[in-house]
Image (spheres, rainbow, N blue to C red):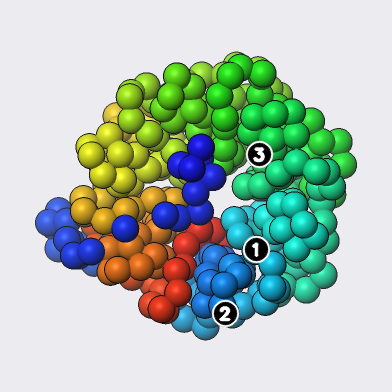
């Protein structure tokens, strides 16, 4: 389960030699992320997509993590234990008006907004093991989406058309990527190996899914077709690379890495070329969410 809920978990910098293409970031998009730079607690921060203008949004003594943008960019959903148990909250994009969406004695975490903004998928162990749930964006009508099959599940990710949800599930001792219809039927296993595949992220056009895996002996970023075929390794570094998230244009992927000694947010071209460090603080930075 540590791979299913990990928000980032180990450097020399090896730049892939796949041509002389350079990373160019343009526009006014933002990246939300998690950092412990204020002390022992984790907070939600936001920065420009080039790493500039870092702002603390939550600044709370509790643990705030796993941010996710609403489709219109006006709100951020996140996980926090500020009221005791880990539950799901939503706030305005400037950090104001944090509001609790789930209320129970179990763990609710890893929220992900549907593309139309009406639903939020998340994980909860309210029925025992961690499973995928879905609720309205205001927290109403919470229900379990996946079946009672044995094994924990985590990190749900909506397809851009809102019809499917990809997630990682641990069954038979290892984690693989699955996809299910947003109606709760039609589960399909996309990866099948004895290693750990986790944290899927759909490309904006819905044709690809990025994820991280230790199938080559070390945690790296991979991308595959949305049907599970054609898995290709994007990063190649002895450190830990994980938690991929696509840029809105689909041309870049942000990810977590500790290749420089601690966890920071990096960005690379969607083909894996030109990895570039965006954050550089003594504390760990991870769990990027791009809008």
Q: Residues within 10 Å of mark 2 (few under 14, many from 20)?
A: few
Q: Which residue is mark 1?
A: 64
Tell me whether the residue at label 1 lies in contact with that at label 3, contact meaning CB atoms closer than 8 angstroms: no
Element assignment for label 3? strand
Real-space Cα separation, disc 2 to disc 1, in angstroms: 12 Å
In the image, residue 23 sits, relative to residue 228, either above or below, namely below
Mark drawn on residue 123? 3
How far across and down, in percent of the image, does residue 145 sit? Answer: 70, 27
| Left-right relation of 267 to 28 | left
Q: Is residue 268 visible?
A: no
Gap between marks 1 and 3 measured at Cα: 16 Å
Q: Which mark is residue 38?
A: 2
Residue found at x 79% / y 30%: 143
Tell me the residue at 61%/60% (across/down).
65
Element on which disc 1 rests: strand
Of the two numbered discs 2 and 1 on the same chain, state the one appearing first in sequence. Answer: 2
Q: Position of residue 157 (x, y in %)?
A: 57, 40
| Element at label 2 | loop
Q: Residue furthest right?
A: 140
Locate residue 116, reporting x and y percent.
71, 45
Q: Which circle, 2 or 3, is nearer the viewer?
A: 2
- Above or below residue 45? Residue 238 is above
If you read the primary sequence from the N terminus, does the residue marked by circle 1 or circle 3 appear first? 1
């Amino acid at each position: 389960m540590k791979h299913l809920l990990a928000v980032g978990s180990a450097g020399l910098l090896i730049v892939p030699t796949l041509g002389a293409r350079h990373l160019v970031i343009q526009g006014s998009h933002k990246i939300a992320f998690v950092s412990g730079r204020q002390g022992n607690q984790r907070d939600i921060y936001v920065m420009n997509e080039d790493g500039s203008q870092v702002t603390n949004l939550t600044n709370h003594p509790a643990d705030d993590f796993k941010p996710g943008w609403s489709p219109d960019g006006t709100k951020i959903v996140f996980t926090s234990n500020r009221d005791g148990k880990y539950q799901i909250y939503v706030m305005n994009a400037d950090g104001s008006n944090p509001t609790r969406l789930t209320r129970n004695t179990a763990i609710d975490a890893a929220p992900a907004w549907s593309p139309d903004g009406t639903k939020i998928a998340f994980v909860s162990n309210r029925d025992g093991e961690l499973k995928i749930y879905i609720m309205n964006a205001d927290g109403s009508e919470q229900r379990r989406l996946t079946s009672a099959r044995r094994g924990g599940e985590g990190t749900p990710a909506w397809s851009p058309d809102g019809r499917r949800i990809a997630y990682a599930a641990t069954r038979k001792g290892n984690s693989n990527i699955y996809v299910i219809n947003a109606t709760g039927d039609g589960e399909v296993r996309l990866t099948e190996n004895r290693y750990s595949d986790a944290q899927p992220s759909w490309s904006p056009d819905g044709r690809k899914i990025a994820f991280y895996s230790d199938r080559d002996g070390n945690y790296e970023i991979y991308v595959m077709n949305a049907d599970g075929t054609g898995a290709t390794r994007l990063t190649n570094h002895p450190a830990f690379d994980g938690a991929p998230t696509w840029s809105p244009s689909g041309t870049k992927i942000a990810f977590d890495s500790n290749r420089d000694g601690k966890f920071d947010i990096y960005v690379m071209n969607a083909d894996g070329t030109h990895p570039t460090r965006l954050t550089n603080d003594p504390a760990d930075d991870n769990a990027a969410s791009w809008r």
